[in-house]
Image (spheres, grey):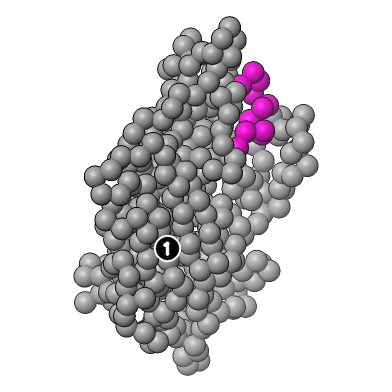
C-alpha cells in the first residue's frame, strides 16, 4: 500500500525562531484527463541531493533535491522529462508550455544547431535539425565553462553545467561550439552570445531555462546564502548588476525549482497542463489529488494539529509519476525541546478520489 513517507526535522523559520517540522511525502500515478491516483511503489524521502552522474557531481544534473528542508516560503514545482514531438512526427523546434495552478512557463526546444561563419567576421546559427525528443535539463541550456585566449578558465555562474558559453580566442573553430537546445522564446540567444568578446558580458546574455531542479551553486541562488565568492564580486564590480548582490541569508535559497515555478503557494488540487511532453498526448492534462495529510505533533503535552503547507510538487513525466511533499511546523522555545517529544503521528484525510477532469 502506498503510504505517506514521514519524518520530523528541526530548524528555524525566516524569523530565526526554532521549529519542528513534520514532512509527509506521497507518490501518485498520473494519466491524461484524470486526477492523480495512488502509485504502487512510493518514492522515498530523500536526505540528500541526487545527480544523474554521481561520479561527477560538480557538473551533473540534479534529478532529486533533498526533502529534508524545515521551511519553504512557497511551493516548488519541478518537471523532469523530455520535450517530445507528437506521434511519429519530427520537429525542428517545439514550445513546451507548463501550467500548474498560478504558474505558467514556456521553454522552446530546438533540434541540433551549429554556429557557422558568415562573411568575413560574422557568425550565424544554422537551421535546427529535425528531432524526436530533447531532454529537459540544464545541460541542454545556455552555460558551461570556457577558456580565454591566454588559457584562463571562466565559469558561467548561472549554469556551469550548460553549453554555448565561449570566449573569443578560446575556440579554434566556431563549428565546434555546442549550441544550447533550450531557450526562452521571448529572449532568444544571439550568435554573439555564444562567442563573447569579454567575460563580463555574461551578465547581458539571456538566462538559462529549464523546468527541472536548479543546482545550489547556480547564480543567483547561491548568493542567497549570504556569501559572495571573491571571484564573483570582482566579475560584477564593473557591471550594472553589482548592486544586486545579496549579503544576507534568504530562505529563497531553499526554493530549488526553476525560475517561474516557485514564488506562490499551491493548495494541492491544481490542474497541471504539459505541452509536448508526451508523444501520444501533445497536451497532457492531469490534476493534483487534493489529498492533504493531517499532521499531529506530540512533544509531551498531547497531540497538536499542524497547518499543512505544500512545499514541493515533482513530476517525473517519463514514468508518469508525481510526488507531493507537505510540511507542518511548530515553533518551539529551544531545539532541545525535541528530547521530550513522545510521539509524531501523520495521517491522511480529505481525498477527492480519481475522476475525469
Q: How many marks?
A: 1
Magenta run includes residue 204: yes
Q: Position of residue 151 (x, y in %)?
A: 55, 13
Q: Which residue is mark 1?
A: 273
Query: For the view shown, which residue lies furthest in the top direction?
Result: 120
Name the quadrant of the C terminus.
Answer: bottom left
Q: Is residue 57 above or below residue 103?
A: above
Q: Is residue 339 above or below residue 315?
A: below
Q: Is residue 332 above or below residue 171?
A: below
Per the rendered image, the range of residues in magenta is 196-206
Q: Tell me if I can see residue 43 in this picture.
A: yes
User: In the rendered view, does 233 fall on the left or right side of 173?
Assistant: right
Name the quadrant of the N terminus.
Answer: bottom left
Residue at 58% in and 66% down: 264
Q: Is residue 216 above or below residue 99?
A: above
Front residue of 79 and 50: 79
Q: Residues within 10 Å of mark 1 (few under 14, many from 20)?
A: some
Q: Position of residue 340 (x, y in %)?
A: 48, 82
Front residue of 301 and 357: 357
Residue at 51% in and 34% down: 142
Residue at 47% in and 43% down: 108
Q: Position of residue 303 (x, y in %)?
A: 46, 90
Q: Secondary structure at mark 1?
A: strand
Residue at 40% in and 58% down: 274
Q: Tell me if I can see residue 69 in this picture.
A: no
Query: For the view shown, which residue lies furthest in the front direction?
Result: 89
Amino acid at each position: 500500500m502506498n503510504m505517506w513517507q514521514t519524518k520530523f526535522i528541526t530548524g528555524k523559520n525566516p524569523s530565526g525562531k526554532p521549529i519542528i517540522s513534520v514532512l509527509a511525502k506521497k507518490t501518485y500515478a498520473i494519466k491524461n484527463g484524470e486526477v492523480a491516483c495512488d502509485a504502487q511503489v512510493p518514492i522515498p524521502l530523500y536526505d540528500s541531493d541526487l545527480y544523474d552522474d554521481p561520479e561527477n557531481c560538480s557538473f551533473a544534473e540534479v534529478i532529486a533535491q533533498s526533502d529534508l528542508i524545515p521551511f519553504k516560503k512557497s511551493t516548488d514545482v519541478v518537471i523532469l522529462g523530455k520535450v517530445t514531438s507528437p506521434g511519429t512526427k519530427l520537429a525542428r523546434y517545439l514550445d513546451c508550455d507548463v501550467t500548474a495552478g498560478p504558474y505558467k512557463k514556456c521553454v522552446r526546444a530546438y533540434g541540433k544547431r551549429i554556429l557557422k561563419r558568415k562573411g568575413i567576421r560574422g557568425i550565424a546559427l544554422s537551421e535546427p535539425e529535425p528531432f524526436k525528443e530533447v531532454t529537459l535539463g540544464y545541460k541542454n541550456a545556455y552555460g558551461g565553462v570556457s577558456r580565454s585566449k591566454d588559457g584562463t578558465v571562466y565559469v558561467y555562474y548561472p549554469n556551469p553545467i550548460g553549453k554555448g558559453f565561449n570566449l573569443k580566442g578560446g575556440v579554434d573553430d566556431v563549428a565546434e561550439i555546442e549550441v544550447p537546445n533550450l531557450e526562452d522564446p521571448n529572449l532568444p540567444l544571439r550568435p554573439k552570445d555564444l562567442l563573447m568578446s569579454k567575460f563580463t558580458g555574461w551578465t547581458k546574455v539571456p538566462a538559462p531555462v529549464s523546468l527541472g531542479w536548479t543546482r545550489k551553486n547556480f547564480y543567483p541562488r547561491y548568493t542567497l546564502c549570504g556569501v559572495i565568492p571573491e571571484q564573483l564580486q570582482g566579475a560584477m564590480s564593473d557591471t550594472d548588476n553589482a548592486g544586486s548582490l545579496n549579503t544576507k541569508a534568504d530562505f529563497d535559497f531553499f526554493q530549488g525549482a526553476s525560475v517561474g515555478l516557485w514564488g506562490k503557494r499551491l493548495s494541492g488540487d491544481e490542474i497541471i497542463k504539459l505541452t509536448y511532453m508526451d508523444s501520444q498526448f501533445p497536451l497532457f492534462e492531469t490534476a493534483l489529488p487534493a489529498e492533504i495529510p493531517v499532521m499531529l505533533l506530540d512533544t509531551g503535552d498531547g497531540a497538536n494539529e499542524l497547518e499543512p503547507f505544500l512545499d514541493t510538487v515533482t513530476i517525473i513525466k517519463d514514468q508518469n509519476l508525481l510526488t507531493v511533499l507537505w510540511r507542518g511546523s511548530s515553533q518551539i522555545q529551544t531545539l532541545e525541546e525535541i528530547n521530550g517529544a513522545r510521539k509524531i503521528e501523520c495521517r491522511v484525510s480529505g481525498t477527492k478520489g480519481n475522476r475525469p477532469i
